[in-house]
Image: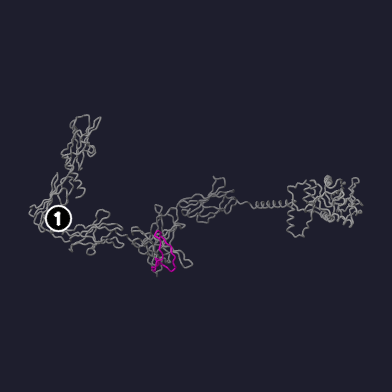
Amino acid sequence: MTLSSVIWRCIIVLLTFSINYFPLLHVGCQRAITSGYLTAEPAPLFLMGSNLTVYCHTDKCDRSSKISMKLNGKPVDKWERINCTTVKFHLPSIWIPLSAAICWQTSDYMTKLVDGLDLLAGLPPDKPDTITCETARSSSLINCSWTRGQETYLPTLYNISVNRENGSQIRLFQIQGADKITIPRRMLDENTTYLIIITASNHFGTSQSDPVVLRVKDIVIPESPIIMKIEFQSNSVAAILQWKSNESSVHLRPHVKLRTNNTSWEMRAGVELSKNLIRTDNLTHLTEYEFQMKICNTAPELTRTNASSITARKALLCSKWSPSMRKTSPGKGPSQQLQVWRKVERQGTDGQRNVTVLWKPLPPEDFSGKVIEYDIFLDNGQKLKTCAAEYFQCAVQLPAEVSSLSISAVTTYGKSPPADVILKQSGVPGSPLIKWSPTADDSAVFVSWSWTTGNYPLKQEEELQYYVMEWTNVPGKGLWWQKLPKDLNSTSITGLTPGVRYNISLYAVTTRGVSAPSPILLYSKEQKPLSGPSLSVLAHEARSIQIQWEELPVSQQRGFITKYKIYFNTQGSKDNEFNKTVSAFGPRQEWLACPEGTLVLQMTASNSAGEGPRGGLIYSQPAAPAVGLVVVCVFIITIFIAIIANLMCWRCARERIKQKCISWGPAWLVENLPKPGHSNAIRLLEHDGVEPLFSCTHSDPPLSPITVISQEERDEIYPNIHVEESQTGSGPLTVKTPFLMSDTEKMLVDRRLEHVGYKPQTGMMNSEEEEVNEVEEKQMDTPLNGEDGRCSSVFEGLLSGLLLSVDVNSSYSSREHTRGFVNDHLRPKPPEPSTISRGFQFLQQHRGTVDEVETDSPSLDLQQDEIMTPDTADPSLSQCTGEIILFGGYFPQIAAVSSDKL
């Protein structure tokens, strides 16, 4: 009897009692507010599946009201009004064990409950069957059980009658709604045969079982065994149960049942290893199991009687189930080898080679727990390195003579079998990849190959062990590989990215070693390039241009480039664009016929997926003619020469250049004669003490202090030179100057001049005189003919004997200005100056007489012996003379030279 059947029986008993004495109402209804009652035909307790009629009676007649009914919450549609207080409802084929019918009366202004009625359906009991009785050898009770058949949904009473073989009743037992009973063993004789009859009855009928023969000695079962110990073999999912029992019969066979986490029991056919040992297989690792055992007698006796209602049967007598024992199965160690591969790098100079050992992780179902580490061993069994569990590759250094390695995974519950890593090369080519094709999802490719034994020498027979498919993405940032059985000749490579180039290689591993790779480049799906090539111009002529382009990076190609397309047009004319297609398999240079002017060029790359975007714009102009370059060079040289010429003509720059050349050359090359006209002091006096803005800086000797002296002191120091001038008619001016002195006189003058400090004085020079002097200076610096050369020689002679200061002027107005300036500064009453030819010089070679010089006089008088004119003078001198202004007072050291000719 199940738990659900017991609950139903209790509910039915309660409902039967309530129907007879306290009819049940709907939840929330109270009898105080009912306005009528319900009746059912044939009865509220009826046979399940029958048609039922329910009448709803109201206390008052109200024809305007409406009476309705609900059965188990659903409205009943079939009804018939009998009179103003009664309505009949039809309920066909009710198969629900317990139903509730509620009647309502509804008027215009309210709805009120009439009453409710519980309806109970049931079935008659089935004949009890499969009656068994058993008792343990040491037990004082006999346990009998039977099957009740279908559920009746009503209280059912079972009568168990124990009769003798002749039919007389010994004992009657009654039990309500049960399927088992316990009979005291002392009531029955061990060797007497009894008959057991079970009768079931309820409201709808009675049924009786067939008689069953019962003899106590035949129903004795073995004692329940006791599980002593449960063991799990290492790295196994089988449990070995050790048990014991008080039974000594050799015909006992153990049976095992188990469950996990309080689930339903599962019978397991155990394997008897030896006496009191049984093994249960196909368990799960790291799982807690609950075990129970029983033992059965394999040789039961065959019982026969004379009663016609008793049949002979063969019974298998088994003990009760033993008490439970719990045990958790251990974790599983790995049973499979690791899938391994290697990547061998070139051998170094020290004889060592770097090897990267690769492996695939173990499948989770192959082991329990977690991976602790990976151990790498040499071929002689020596441990080489331990690698961390979170990595799937490990780098080691090996001598060149090492031909193989082995690797194992160490887990919580054991180690995997060692897997060999072959390092030796077989020296023969591998199987070429003869075919490949993309798949529908664009993330995989299908490749195939062919293995032929003709690849190897006949004398060295080799056995193929397996293949290794290796692939990397270009430019080789990732490495993937797959180990394949030797009987395969095709496979699919998954997980590829469209637009990425892959280098796929196939290796054949034989007993001789690893073959050479058979590579192939492919894409799972080509896509348009991401960018255009970069262009550069090699040559650009008037109507042709030579360009060069760079190959796109592999990551930008996204396919095998088959062609390039060049777009070009003149700057500013986008509508008139030209293009040319070139093959991607030729040189990356091309000559293009193009229009004149500045060109704008772009380029695209194409693969099987289509044309990519254009590259960057470049601009190119045709090369300028060679004549233009010559013109530019000539123009630059001309500008340079003009600058140099200006520098040469600019006095200040010329002087600086001259000084620099003098400083670089030897001292004896140029005699540095001072020129009073370049004195800064004189220039300052000429400009009223204001220094010109762009003046050249010259080094002057330090200025002596100026002392004002009286007329008498001046006459004692400076000699007077008297010059008379006369002019007859319109002819040239005639000057008589006694300028020749004796040696004694010269010595006297020199002695007196030694006591006089240097007092520079000068006359004013107007702008016109300066211009003339500059012109004359340029003529003197660059002589053009022989006459200029002669002038230079004359002036050199003058410099050697000149004691007087002269001022060379080109106009009379300047003489007047100079005379006034000197008179104002030097003496109160200067005499009239005499103007003579500029070529007149005080040289001993020319004509003239010198008057006697009075040695006792402080002044020196020069008497006129002869008047000499420029016309009568030396021809060479007359050509180089200018006008000379001589002042009344003799002032030998103070002179303003208007020209650089001195």
Q: Which residues are magenta?
A: 377-405
Task: Specify the amino acid type for callout 1.
Answer: Ile
Which residue is more in the foreground, 87 or 607? 87
Task: Determine the secondary structure under disc 1.
Answer: strand
Q: Few, some or many C-alpha atoms within 10 Å of disc 1 (few <14, some 14-19, many ≥20)? A: many
Which residue is more in the foreground, 734 or 400? 734
Which residue is more in the foreground, 410 or 452? 410
Is 732 placed left or right of 650 in the picture? Answer: right
Q: Is residue 483 above or below residue 804?
A: below
Which residue is more in the foreground, 549 or 896? 896
Q: Which residue is mark 1?
A: 142
Question: Looking at the picture, how far across and down is residue 343, in whole percent?
Answer: 43, 62
Q: Is residue 568 above or below residue 391?
A: above
Is 867 placed left or right of 156 in the picture? Answer: right
Q: Residue furthest bottom?
A: 459
Image quarter for residue 283?
bottom left
Question: Looking at the picture, how far across and down is residue 206, in whole percent?
Answer: 13, 47
Question: Looking at the picture, how far across and down is residue 508, in whole percent?
Answer: 40, 63
Report the number of numbered marks: 1
Question: Looking at the picture, how far across and down is residue 251, in whole percent?
Answer: 18, 62
Does 67 lie within the magenta span?
no
* Residue 883 in view: no
